[in-house]
Amino acid sequence: KTKFNITVIPGDGIGPEVTKQAQKALEAVGDVYGYTFLYKEALMGACAIDETGNPLPDETLELCKESDAILFGAIGDPKYDNDPSAKVRPEQGLLKLRKELGLFCNIRPVKAYDTLIKNSPLKEEIISGTDTVIYRELTGGIYFGIKELSDDGKQAFDGCSYSVEEIERMAHLAFKAARSRKKKVTLVDKANVLETSRLWRKTVTELAKEYPDVELDFLFVDNAAMQLILNPKQFDVILTGNLFGDIISDEASVIGGSIGLLASASVGSENALFEPIHGSFPQAKGKDIANPLASVLSAAMLLDHLGLQDGARAIEAAVQKSLELGITTEDINSERSFSTSKVGDFISDYIQNQEDSNLN
Ligand code: IPM
Ligand code: MN
């Protein structure tokens, strides 16, 4: 197969600017390796509420279901963040999409890039060599439990629930990933307090017997938060639930030197969505200053998912080069910075020219 249908959901804030650069990278890969990507754009988030009243219009959901992969930008708008009484919120669009498509596993790789080590506020000797990946459960837990607000508005409730089945399907993916990496899974939970966490421990311990070649260890999430910046090199695959994964993945982004670099894949049995872990950065919207690399790297994950490893590696090499040469946005180097679109141009040119020079 060489033709692929991609649904592009630019979303809010800087989403459209960064996904555009990712598409440029995909186009370059298409040219060089002979693939065709057919894009259809769809609305989700605050922009969808503005146009249709619905953060996830049915059309968007249908398009996503039919496509080979989804490239998503960012979601959120400050006008909703400070309004606790808002009935519809942009984030509901993304949460509903994850749920409806069954994207239960969110994969967030975290690497210390040598060229960026000085950008991290953490010490070089601590982060250098870090190579870990967070496997975050994405369609369960407290995000999707029963929610209640009492009639008088004075009490609120968020339920957290996990089933053995939800835990097992995640754990299998995490152990399989560990097999092709450093063969270690760390389960991050709060089993000293939470019943759901105790079920995670029990289930994962049992399932680990099927993977005798992979080491399993456990950390409470508070300790894990500390270990992640004290000694991140100890981690290979981190397996965790929805809320803990949300929190520690932002924390882990500090290791990479910029949150503008972290990509993610959200996969289920039928569909897959690729997105940066950063938010919509509304202050930068339309200014052509946002870092597009997380989105570009999400496109690389998308290619891997489609089995187009050559293209994925080409994008990664181009990103590596842009970091080496300092063709980067102001979050990485404020003294010498390039615009979002210039970085995107560099990436796509590099993919094309690199291939030419290989042929010579
Ligand atoms: C993320 C985001 C989302 C989440 C928000 C936008 C709902 O923070 O993808 O990490 O909490 O999952
Ligand atoms: Mn988050």
Image (tube, helix red, strand yellow):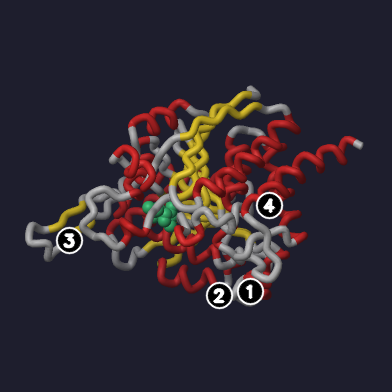
Question: Do tag 1 and tag 2 residues touch (Cβ < 8 Å)?
Answer: yes
Tell which tag, 4 or 2, sits nearer the viewer: 4
- Residue at (70, 47) in percent of width and height: 345
Inspect the image, locate mark 3, and give the three-letter code of the amino acid beneath it. Ala
- In the displayed structure, 33 sits above or below 71; it is above
Q: Residues within 10 Å of mark 3 (few under 14, many from 20)?
A: few
Question: Do tag 3 and tag 4 residues touch (Cβ < 8 Å)?
Answer: no
- Residue under label 3, please give it: 156
- Residue at (33, 67) in percent of width and height: 192
Tell which tag, 1 or 4, sits nearer the viewer: 4
Could you tell me how far apart the alpha carbons at marks 1 and 2 are, in whole angstroms? 7 Å
Inspect the image, locate mark 4, and give the three-letter code of the amino acid beneath it. Lys
- Residue at (66, 67) in percent of width and height: 333
- Residue under label 2, please give it: 230
Q: Residues within 10 Å of mark 4 (few under 14, many from 20)?
A: some
Inspect the image, locate mark 1, and give the three-letter code of the amino acid beneath it. Ile
- Residue under label 1, please give it: 126
Which image quadrant: the N terminus? top right
Could you tell me how far apart the alpha carbons at marks 1 and 4 are, in whole angstroms? 32 Å
Could one spot residue 184 in this view of the protein? no
